[in-house]
Image (cartoon, rainbow, N blue to C red):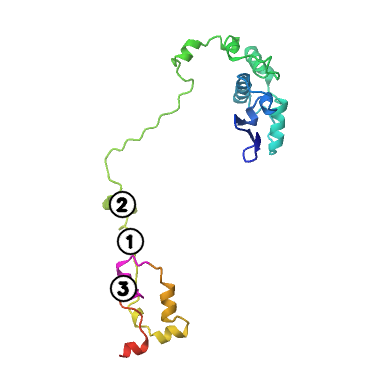
Amino acid sequence: MHLNTDKGMISGKNFAGTARFMAPEVATKKTITTQADVWSLGIMTAELITGSVRPISNSKQRRIEMAQMGEYSISNRDELSLALRIFLDACLTYDYALRSNANALKKFEFFKNLNWEDVEMLRLPPPYQPTQLEFKPKINVDPSDPNVLALALAAEIPEDQVEIHKDLAAISQTALDSFGYTRDKLNQMFENFEYEHSSSTSLDLHNQEGPSIQSESENQN
């Protein structure tokens, strides 16, 4: 078992969990039972109802220590219903051997209006119904249609343009040599260059299909 320093989690070959919701006996590496899930249920319920039950700490080690000690504090506890307080106390009992199990929790007053058979059979609607947003286009259009793209851009579709200097092939090798760009140097520079544009073949330095750069004496001949 080791500490995951990225997330402040205790993890190992057999289990992993967030320290904030981890039962003390798990954080102390003592044992893992189903009662650990009951502890996590209690912490999660308390946080959903009252807010954070532990101080926010940037120290991963401190978060682990709070989990090991079972440290928590429920704000406005006295304002909660008696049934809820009893439920939370049962879930958050430090000694896992004395902590209620799931079957015992189902009989608590807190769940008196809940039919567990309906829960098991998935017959209960969720208490919260998220808004369902559906988008149905009124017309069918092809987003790749050039006319549609032109309208969307409010102008003609932009095109990549490559302009080749018309007099580039006429530059003398002597002028290039004076700047250190000898024929061998140029061929070496463009050895692995791939000409993909149809108009770029005029710059071919390997005599493939376009004219190569010639020396001034060769141009005179």
Give the image location of residue 186, x and y in percent: 42, 77
Point out which mark residue 145 bears. Answer: none
Query: Quick one: label 2, few (<14), some, or many (20+) residues within 10 Å?
Result: some
Q: Which residue is mark 1?
A: 159
Q: Which residue is mark 3?
A: 208
Q: Camera-side residue: 100 or 218?
A: 218
| C-alpha distance separating marks 3 and 1 | 28 Å
Q: Nearer the viewer, mark 3 or mark 2?
A: 3
Q: Amino acid at mark 1?
A: Glu
Of the two numbered discs 3 and 1 on the same chain, state the one appearing first in sequence.
Answer: 1
Stretch of the chain drawn in magenta: 194-208
Q: Which residue is mark 2?
A: 149
Of the two numbered discs 2 and 1 on the same chain, state the one appearing first in sequence.
Answer: 2
Q: Amino acid at mark 3?
A: Gln
Assess whether mark 2 and mark 3 are in contact (beta carbons under 8 angstroms). Answer: no
| C-alpha distance separating marks 2 and 1 | 12 Å
Give the image location of residue 215, x and y in percent: 37, 86
Number of marks in picture? 3
Element assignment for label 2: helix
Element assignment for label 1: loop
State the predominant SS element of the stretch in magenta: loop
Extreme residue in the front direction: 13
Residue at left 58%, top 15%? Answer: 102
Q: Is residue 151 left or right of residue 106?
A: left
In which quarter of the view is residue 39 placed?
Answer: top right
Classify the position of the N terminus by image quarter.
Answer: top right
Query: Quick one: label 1, few (<14), some, or many (20+) residues within 10 Å?
Result: few
Q: Amino acid at mark 2?
A: Leu
